[in-house]
Amino acid sequence: MMRQIERLYSALMRRNPESEREMPPAVRADIAPNGVRQVVANTLQSSGDQAVNASTVLPWLFAVLGVPSALTGLLVPIREAGSMLPQAVLTPLVLRMRRRKWIFVAGAVVQASAVGAMALVAAVGHGLAAGVAIIAALAGFALGRCLCSIASKDVQGRTIPKGERGQINGLATTAAGLVAITLGVTIRVTGGDDLGSAQFAGLLGGAAALWVAVAIVYAGVREPLPEEVEGSRSDDREDGWLRRMSDLLRDDKPFRDFVAVRGLLLVSALSPPFVVAASIESGAGALSGLGGFVIASGLAALLGGRLFGRWADRSSRRLMSVGAAVAAVIVIATVAVVSLPGFEARGWAGNLFFTAVYFALTLTHTGVRVARKTYVVDMAEGDRRTVYVAVSNSAIGVLLLVVGAISSLLAAVDVAWALLFLAAMGLVGVFAGSRLPEVSRR
């Protein structure tokens, strides 16, 4: 069985023998089985995410259940900021755990429970009460994701060598993209835009089962104890955590620069909804179906996951800069085209244009996500890595709320202004990202 797993891992990955030799002997023997388990667990988790997408699936569910539209605007902030902001507070709990995989398993169980609760509400709920219950469950889901985010990068850093970590993330993204395309096609064929509450309940129930499987698979990861991994200990303990967090952002220039660059990379994350809004204003209809959204995001993940995973292992810093540049250019070009006199998106040409823009931005965001995940894992070791992940995610949670508020205010005047603001951030991110130190194994 071990030989088969080794062959499978070697077939999936472009292995880095030099980095593998630098791993402690106790870790080196388990690289392949640990890598396969992390690919499978991350694939299952990313596939479940498609069924709980706060930008597509949950707004549609709210419409089916008759939830007031005012609550729809809370979905993305709760999902995104809720999974980031608590990380600095929860890090002392994580640092007390010698094997961090159990934090990930606990987070997966929390997510399974939260999505199961959403499925129940979808089956029997309606109106305002259903909306409030789903938002409460989404907050619990975000907390579970928060735990998984803190733990997963530390476990990956302990068990997978540099030069292979980006490919782990990329393979999981690719496989999840295939699942998303299948799901999107199924939605289009079986329900189109007329999905009922029963179909949503079944979809969410299936997603809850996926997170149970995530917990089971990840529990089998053979994570070494801290003393078995060279350089895995640090002085970052829970005492005076808030002070240590502020000191880290003030005194650790490479880390502070990474957080700043990551904030500027929000252009690829926040611009797609505004592109959809621009398409609606222009009369396009191609993006109006739920299945179409899911298919577009899945195709981007399928095409970009493996490519960007290998690129991130060569230079995650360069991939972040290129991603910011491409996203900014796409956004600026979109605004320029939409601003042309007489432009309207009714008809196949306009629909194709906005579909292509949405797909391109989603593809770019796939690369940015793989790059920044790989960068933060490669830039530190041991407990220092855990601290970096938690503090950067908490800081980005705050920036997400601030940038989201500014772009929303600009969009109230004109969607084009919001897009140009995000594009300007991306252009600054190109230059800031190029100044980051190289941490990848070339």
Image (tube, helix red, strand yellow):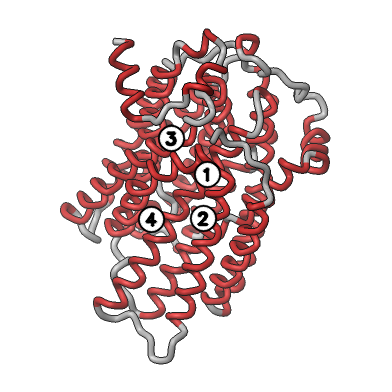
Residue type of the residue flagged with mark 4: Thr
Q: Is residue 116 visible?
A: no
Q: CA–CA distance between discs 3 and 4?
A: 27 Å
- Cα distance between the residues tagged 1 and 4: 24 Å
Alpha carbons under labels 1 and 2: distance apart = 9 Å
Looking at the picture, tell me which residue is in the foreground, 436 or 368. Answer: 436
Q: Which residue is mark 3?
A: 167
Question: Residue 342: where, in percent of width, then height?
Answer: 38, 91
Q: Are marks 1 and 3 in contact (CB under 8 Å)?
A: no
Residue neighbourhood size for the residue with mark 4, other residues' Cα within 10 Å, grouped as few (<14), some (14–19), many (≥20):
some
In space, the residues marked 2 and 3 are separated at their CA atoms by 17 Å
Q: Amino acid at mark 1?
A: Ala
Which residue is identified by label 1?
Answer: 371
CA gap, disc 4 and disc 2 = 23 Å
Q: Earlier in the sequence, mark 1 or mark 3?
A: 3
Residue 73's place in the image compared with 106, above or below, is below
Q: Quadrant of residue 42?
A: top left
Q: Earlier in the sequence, mark 2 or mark 3?
A: 3
Which of the two discs, 3 and 4, labels the residue nearer the N terminus? 4
Foreground residue among 61 and 19 = 19
As helix, strand or loop, the secondary structure at mark 3 comes to helix
Q: CA distance from mark 1 to mark 3?
A: 10 Å
